[in-house]
Amino acid sequence: MNTRGKKMDMTLESLLDVFISTKQTEGKSRSTVSWYRGMLSGFLAWMGEGKRLKDFTLLSARAFVAHLQARTTRYDDHPLSHVVQGGLSPHSIHGYVRSLRSFSSWLA
């Protein structure tokens, strides 16, 4: 099986782990690596467990962004903060988009 076939068979969680390892070996700071993991983990949680590369499409990314834009609260599952009314800022949503763009470029 070629490299592409192996990637297609991997779960998105596994691919995220390889992506994070790549960022670490590229010398990215701990905070940058943590930021990528946090942003992309949010997307993977929204996608659901066990999804494969074939499930990561432009449509799924756009649906996730629409989901973020429709949110009416922040810190829903945060261990240290209480739920706050109000949606995510455009800056926060743009962070998710930037992380998805970087992850998809790396996958390509």
Image (spheres, rainbow, N blue to C red):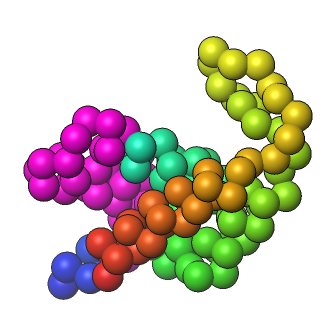
Q: Say whether residue 79 is magenta.
A: no
Quarter-of-image position of residue 96: bottom right
Residue 9, visible in the rendered structure: no
Does residue 82 sit above or below 108 in this rendering? above
Does residue 107 sit above or below 78 in this rendering? below
Q: Residue furthest top?
A: 80
Check the picture and name the quadrant holding the C terminus. bottom left
The residue lying toward the viewer, choosing from 53 and 101, is 101
Q: Is residue 19 left or right of residue 73?
A: left
The residue lying toward the viewer, choosing from 12 and 39, is 39
Tell how many labels. Answer: 0
Magenta stretch, main secondary structure class: helix
Magenta region:
7-34
Check the picture and name the quadrant holding the N terminus. bottom left
Residue at the image point whose x is 28% and y is 50% from the top: 20
Residue 103, visible in the rendered structure: yes
Residue 66 picture location, percent across and down: 77, 67
Residue 71 picture location, percent across and down: 83, 50
Residue at the image point whose x is 71% and y is 31% from the top: 75
Q: Is residue 105 left or right of residue 90?
A: left
Residue 5 picture location, percent across and down: 29, 81
Residue at the image point whose x is 80% and y is 26% from the top: 83
Residue at the image point whose x is 88% and y is 34% from the top: 85
Q: Say whether residue 8 is magenta.
A: yes
Residue 34 picture location, percent across and down: 37, 39
